[in-house]
Amino acid sequence: MTHSPAEEPKLCWLCGKNEATEPYALSKQTEMICATCLERRRARDALEDRLIYITNLEYDRRYDAALACLDEILEANRHRDHDLWLARSIAMLRSSILFNAGRYAEAEKACEAWAQLGFRNIHDRWMHAFEKAQTLNALGRPREALAVVEDGLGHQDPRYIEAAMLLLTPLVRLSKKLGQPVDPKWRGLAEAWARHHEIDMPVGDSLEKTILELQKIYRARKPEFANDEGAEDEADET
């Protein structure tokens, strides 16, 4: 498309780089985006539009139906998934559904397939480590699970520090299960997480107790955890 000298092409509302040529409808308005972003959004919408349905299938323990739905979405939109966002998202959901179904050997294979796709950022890497660690623990391999958690924590990015408790908590649980202390090298990460959430570090406690106390304080601030009093006791049994 050519433009007169006085006419500057409008840039894509999403990426801000390419020329905006395609209308994309949001909930209350329509924005102009580029053809590349339109493909990405169509792939993303194909999954997000059916997430509630998939969640309900899983809630009803119709695990095979939920997995089949994921396969259907991926196959129908694979040609649009240029950045593998859809493939990675479906791999994560597949791992979680298989774990919740108690199909741990399949869940482990799903985690391996997920890793083969690579990780977009540290948060995705930590999510993978969490899923794989809980699967290995369920398979009776807690030492391998702990190694996965520590490997995940070895990859850090300050932009994602708010999510560090995702692995710090299983770090404590698995270390306790194996009868060993948490490596003190992770104290700095716990301190950084506490600073990010504006929580004072408990004084004088072991690192294990400090991490669990930080988690308890954080959860007490969140209304979604208000009626989840037994979560910590239950987690101690894993």
Image: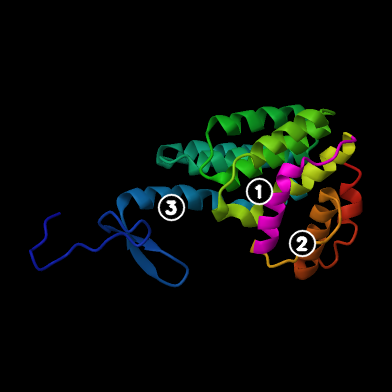
Query: What numbered label is drawn on residue 169?
Result: none
Q: Main secondary structure of the magenta part?
A: helix
The answer to which of marks 3 and 1 sits earlier in the sequence is: 3
Residue extending furthest toward the front:
204
Q: Give the colour scheme of this rendering.
A: rainbow
Query: What numbered label is drawn on residue 201?
Result: 2
Query: Could you tell whether 164 is left or right of 204 in the image?
Result: left
What span is colored magenta in the figure? 179-195
State whether residue 195 appears in this view: yes
Q: Secondary structure at mark 3?
A: helix
Q: Are marks 2 and 1 in contact (CB under 8 Å)?
A: no
Q: In which quadrant will I find the C terminus?
A: top right
> Which image quarter: residue 31?
bottom left
State whether residue 65 appears in this view: no
> Could you say which is closer to the camera, residue 162 or residue 133?
162
Query: What numbered label is drawn on residue 41?
Result: 3
> Could you say which is closer to the camera, residue 227 or residue 208?
208
> Which image quarter: residue 3?
bottom left
Q: Where 221 falls versus 71 (above or below)?
A: below
At x 63%, y 37%, the residue is 68
Q: How many marks?
A: 3
**Which residue does the numbered mark 1 point to in the structure image?**
54
User: Marks 2 and 3: which is nearer the front?
Assistant: 2
Q: Are marks 3 and 1 in contact (CB under 8 Å)?
A: no
Residue 51 position in % (x across, y down): 61, 52
> Which image quarter: residue 15?
bottom left
At x 71%, y 29%, the residue is 108
